[in-house]
Amino acid sequence: MQDDGKNRLTVDIFGQQYRLTGKASVNHMRMVAGYVDDKMNEISRGNSRLDTTKIAVLAAVNISDEYFRLRKEYEELLRILEEDARRQVNSRG
C-alpha cells in the first residue's frame, strides 16, 4: 500500500464507528470527532425524543453557529489590529 501522507483512524461518534482519513494529525481528528460526539450527546440529553438524524443536524447547526460567531470575532480582531498598525505607522511618520 502506498503512503499517501494521510492519517487514518476509527472514531466513535454517538455510538457509531466512523473511519476518518485526512492530512490533519491523528490528535486533531480525534479532537474534532470528540467535539461532534460531545455536541450530539449534549443535544440528545436535552431532547430525548429526537432521532439520530435530527440530533446530527442540530449538532451541525450549533457547530456552524459557533464557527460563524468566532469567524466574525476573528475578522473584527484583524480589523482592530490593522487599524492599530496603521495608527502606529502614521504616528511615526
Image (spheres, rainbow, N blue to C red):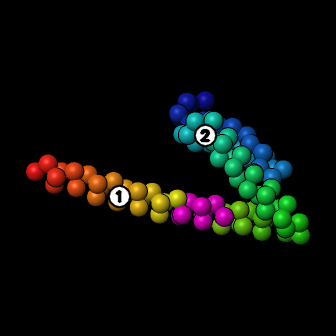
**Image position of 34 with respect to 7: above or below:** below
Percent position of residue 9, x then y: 69, 37
Label ID, residue 28:
2
User: Can I make out residue 14 in this image?
Assistant: yes
Q: Residue at x 56, y 60 (%)?
A: 67
Based on the displayed image, in which of its 4 quarters is residue 79 positioned?
A: bottom left
Percent position of residue 55, x then y: 78, 64
Residue at image mark 1: 80
Total label count?
Answer: 2
The stretch in magenta equals 62-69
Percent position of residue 92, x then y: 14, 48
Characterize the local packing of mark 1: few (<14), some (14-19) or many (20 or more) Cα atoms within 10 angstroms: few
Label ID, residue 40:
none
Quick one: SS at disc 2? helix
Q: Residue furthest right?
A: 49
Instruction: Look at the image and say whether residue 67 sits in the magenta stretch.
Output: yes
Q: Main secondary structure of the magenta part?
A: helix
Q: Amino acid at mark 1?
A: Ile
Q: Amino acid at mark 2?
A: His
Point out the image quarter for the N terminus: top right
